[in-house]
Amino acid sequence: AKASVAIAALPSTEELKNSIIKHLHGSLGTDVNKASPQAWWRATCAAVNEYVYDGLRNTQRTHYLQNTRAVHYFSLEYLMGRLFSNNLHNIGVYDAAKVALAELGLNIADLEDQEEDMALGNGGLGRLAACFIDSMATLNFPAIGYGIHYEHGLFKQEFSDGRQIERPDSWREYGNPWEICRPESIQEISVYGYVETTYDLQGKMKKVWHPGRIIKGVPWDIPVVGYQGSSVNVLRLWESRASDFFNWDVFNSGGYIDAARQNIEAETISKVLYPNDETDAGKELRLIQQYFFCSCSLKDIIRRYKRANGDDWSKFPQQVAIQLNDTHPAVAIPELMRILVDRADMGWDDAWNICQHVFAYTNHTLLPEALEKWSVRLFEKVLPRHLEIIYEINRRFLVEQVDVLWPGDNDKKRKLSIIEESHEPMVRMGHLSVVGSFRVNGVAQIHSELVKSDLFPEMVALWPDKFTNVTNGVTPRRWLKACNPRLAKLLDETIGDEWPRDLKQLEKFAAFADDPAIQDAFMAIKQQNKADLATVVKKLTNISIDPHAIFDVQIKRLHEYKRQHLNLLHILALYRRILQNPDYDMVPRVFLFGAKAAPGYKLAKEIIYAINKVAEKINNDKRVKNRLKVVFMPNYRVTLAEKMIPAADVSEQISTAGKEASGTGNMKLALNGAITVGTLDGANIEIAEEVGPDNISIFGLTVDEVKALQAKGYHSWDYYYQDTEIKAILDWLETDYFTPGKPGELSAIKRSLLEGGDPYLVLADFQSYVKAQEKVESWYRDQSGWAKKAILNTALMGKFTSDRSIEDYVERVWKLDACKISQD
Ligand code: 26Y
């Protein structure tokens, strides 16, 4: 049963073929005899776009005619990956296109490889935004994603002698077939300058911002195709350009070169994605990026609102919800205040009332270094009027809220103030987001509790109902149907084909967990996926891996709290056991890593280097007899995840308890039948609840135990002196065993674990981790038992579809109605 279909008629294979050739001639200016794979890919995209645009028109018209309430997702990051196979699957023409292309003598997989990843994000937060816009379109919710049209996405990673090298990513160097430029919707925004205080004839004070710079925002629209064409929503990304208007002045004063320089400066704003995650650098350009896209987006929203509702602002909060993806777009709050108070002449109370009914804020992290703060000095330079507005928001908050609940309590005021008073005063964006939003959520149950208890306890006392949880999810269209077609087919055949839009249906698959035929089919699929991955590994790294070994996968950004170095210590322990006992009995295992380190994160880069050096040694050591292989996949990204996840047996989710807000890779891997080795952190806890203790290997300190240990005083040296295995491994890293002739090259890890105090409790969790790995190994020795566990992991992941997350947002935050799309 198709819910509601924005796209009217789907093409037959024959029609697709004709359309591809039509576009090869008419759009690409080439012909079948000389077309490159790139041209074929573009022609196929153009053919597909005829249907995408059909759905887009129908969706936009329906939303306009019904004047629907909509959610506006504000995010600095969208980690989209490739769109080709996703769009074909969601429209429902993947199989037809595959046949059409085959009849034209082409392999669809080769065409897929023509597309660059759209890597406009760092990691979990950016990929979550991409899953959410897929779900919002699938569920027919009126929704727009707003962000930045970065010219360069996340850097490409190469290894040179094991060290990470960053290279520019130019995903749209030759144009991108999925995006549409919309010059008719250009916006202009201001930065810098000064604020003048004036008085009108009635003596009323009026603030006038005289900007120092005006910048143009050019919108690029990416259609977001819902599953089975339900709705086609839009992701609108802003590109910065010099304002024609502004440069005219410079020209007239004879500053030709100056005008050119200002052009370059304006274009710099959307030039590149900041490659940091979880560590705020506080850079001026980053603040300008945030303001640029927030201001363009708000003006876009207001223009659309006024077209439907005229100058009456009273319905604005009824029509518009804005979701802030972390604090990165929090400057939208003072920007909306400025528009209402300074431009629309609204009184402060009315304006604030509107703001507080429009914004909602999602927190993705508790790590102190990730909590954004801008120096007051920088804020004043870039956005002088917004700083004044923030001061006024803060003044009223402290007087009308904080002082009412805690009269005369200056400690509370200091702690809750949006302005941190230190030698360099700072604007706290988290505080601003909580104060300016009607709802605040964390991204997994435990994380949402920690947001309340550890991050904002006083805010909870002020507004207990403001805080809620929405556990993350992932889209099963990309993360099962498209990336694991073999498993998708088995599911279709056993439980029907409704699961991609109703993932709870997977529970029916649990009934087959003991069925030998299904176990065999499931394991055969995993085996084929592993063989496919082995081919990719060989091509990318020249390392041969055995598809019959356990594929143990850790894929995520590189960060100390995620503890890739704990994984490394375990590998070293196994290696050492093999060397000490040549007959050491273990199931052969391939450890696969994928991770980018922020370019300025020294220790993260040392960890990459250490893993690569240890890998080199182990992979070439005959004594290992292939019991161990270690592979660090270069340039981990969405497209590589799509190849690694279907082939994983074991999923490494080993963060220090309390540090990983949710995780989403954990969900993708379990959905594809990998067994989790994990701590009780983030969504691992909820995964464990779903699959039960027999189907997950949990280890390590709990959040409460971590807190207790740190309160009593944690001494990593004790573990070093008391555990001979730990001592031997850490000492080993200091020798030149892995870096011949260069002792000490891998000592950074040991230093951070000992002199550095081991802030993420790696040594405290080590032996527990080793045991959890032994448990997994013993499980694997029983192939039928393993098949059952793997099947149950897939079957019991229904909760973790991003459709459920979006339904939770709709119910707990946005209060939206779905909108069935009608055709013209
Ligand atoms: C301030 C700036 C440097 C910054 C930029 C990016 C700070 C943080 C980030 C990204 C954070 C991020 O990706 N967080 C992850 O969000 C996922 C989606 O909610 C979670 O699953 C994951 O646990 C969390 O680390």
Image (cartoon, grey):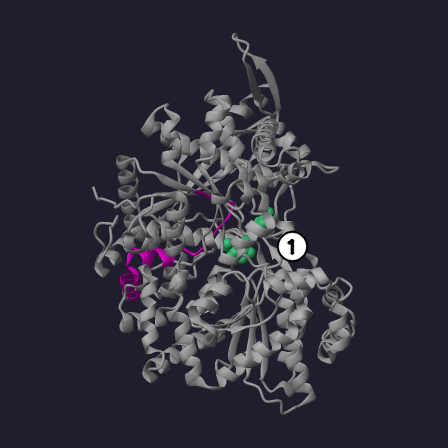
- Residue 744 position, x and y percent, is 78, 69
- Left or right relative to 437: residue 758: right
- Left or right relative to 602: residue 447: left
The answer to whether one can see residue 314 in this image is yes
Q: SS class of the residue under badge 1?
A: loop
- Residue 619 position, x and y percent, is 62, 79
Count of numbered tags: 1
Please state which amino acid type lies under the numbered disc 1: Pro
* Residue labelled with disc 1: 599
Of 114 and 341, the residue lying toward us: 341
Relative to 555, residue 358 above or below: above
Identity of the residue drawn at 25% across and 57% down: 16
- Residue 779 position, x and y percent, is 49, 82
In this view, the residue farthest toward the bottom is 583
**The magenta stretch spans residue 770:** no
- Residue 61 position, x and y percent, is 27, 38
Within the image, what quadrant is residue 680 found in?
bottom right
Quarter of the image where the N terminus is located: bottom left
- Residues in magenta, as a range: 73-102
Relative to 163, residue 23 above or below: above
Relative to 209, residue 785 above or below: below
Of 13 and 309, the residue lying toward us: 309
Of 658 and 143, the residue lying toward us: 658
Quarter of the image where the C terminus is located: top left
**The magenta stretch spans residue 93:** yes
Relative to 150, residue 107 above or below: below
The answer to whether one can see residue 161 in this image is no
Q: Is mark 1 within 8 Å of ligand 1?
A: no
Within the image, what quadrant is residue 475 found in?
bottom left
Of 95 and 644, the residue lying toward us: 644
Identity of the residue drawn at 22% across and 49% down: 8
